Image (cartoon, rainbow, N blue to C red):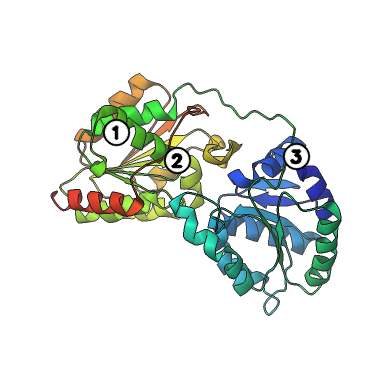
Amino acid sequence: MEAEKILDIIGADFYTGVPDSQLKALCDYLMDTYGIDFRHHVIAANEGNCTALAAGYHLATGKIPVVYLQNSGEGNIINPVASLLNDQVYAIPMIFIVGWRGEPGVHDEPQHIYQGKITLKLLEDMDIRTFILDKETKEDELRNAMGKFQAVLATGKSVAFVVRKGAVSYNGKIKYENNYTMSREEIIRHIVAVSEKDPIISTTGKASRELFEIREANGQDHKYDFLTVGSMGHSSSIALGAAVQKPGTKIWCIDGDGAVLMHMGAMAVIGTCGCGNLVHVVINNGAHETVGGMPTAAGNIELTKIASACGYGYTVCVDDFDALDKELNAAKKRNGLTLIEARAAIGARDDLGRPTTPAIENKRNFMEYLSTLA
């Protein structure tokens, strides 16, 4: 069904969310229609942030907001749904649109399998009524479901449309781009060259896929890398946890701007620790590229100043390879917590593959390698 028709039937005028590849058509339609307009459409830092924004909208207008998310973000909405929205607390109703990755019986990546299995149960446990939207859903079926949902929303409870793969379409053409020239894959290639045999912990999405393929192309062992294929926003915390236990080893974290924004409080913890053997590289293209390229707020802020305020000893922003190489080599030698923000273009190879090593094997090999280091 076309995104415009779906949203017309829902009938809301405020949308906030974290983009999802399964909801790309919906996200593109919202960007084409509203862009980033805080009165009507906001791409937030994480799903809990979206839910709170939507609650504020409801308090100010009395109208029903819409929150969109990938099902992996259900964990981030549990707290505000249970302790803020619930009808036994403030009875703040809202409509969730949830992309169903890892649906049972549908092939998907390992990080989505268990989440897909428990998607409907989590919503049920949060007392959120659901309707599954698929390719075969007719307009009258959706209208009927929305009519029933209106009665639920009137009681102060929330509802959710769970969206199967390919259920939403949009024929508009929208291009996401910026003015930077370095590609993320080449940035990672330079990090690999400088880090040599140092352990690398990489963030969710295309960054980990590119790191895996770079090792393959170089004929290098994958034991040096931990690929954080799920758990968006937590790679820097994983890197900190490893770095404090291996003080004699340089630990590199390859992060993304969307991931940093999702759990930015981690930077305060990292800065407080002041771990001198940690190099935090944030590849900032101002976009949620892995799920379609929709913008993040990181294109408008200075992550280096935030990191410095959090306690990072050295921070720098680079936008060309000469500066990047200089800073990577200096970080390799430096005994001090470092953040390098690398401004990157939006885009990746069309033939970019996915890791072929099972997640459990990746963990085991990485742990065995760490055990040999000081």
Q: Which residue is mark 2?
A: 256
Residue 323 to residue 165: above or below: above
> Residue sitting at 34 percent across and 37 percent down?
212
> Residue sitting at 23 percent across and 38 percent down?
221
Report the residue that reaches farthest toward the front: 105
- Bin the neighbour count of mark 1 within 10 Å (Cα to Cα): few under 14, some 14-19, many 20 and up: some
Q: Amino acid at mark 1?
A: Arg
Residue 48 to residue 167: above or below: below
Q: Quadrant of residue 36?
A: top right
Horizontal side, residue 154 vs residue 181: left or right: right
Could you tell me which secondary element the residue under label 3 belongs to? loop
Residue 180 location, x and y as percent?
50, 23
Horizontal side, residue 286 vs residue 163: left or right: left
Q: Nearer the N terminus, badge 1 or badge 2?
A: 1
Horizontal side, residue 354 vs residue 338: left or right: right
Q: Quadrant of residue 166?
A: top right
Q: Which residue is mark 3?
A: 34
Gap between marks 2 and 3 measured at Cα: 25 Å
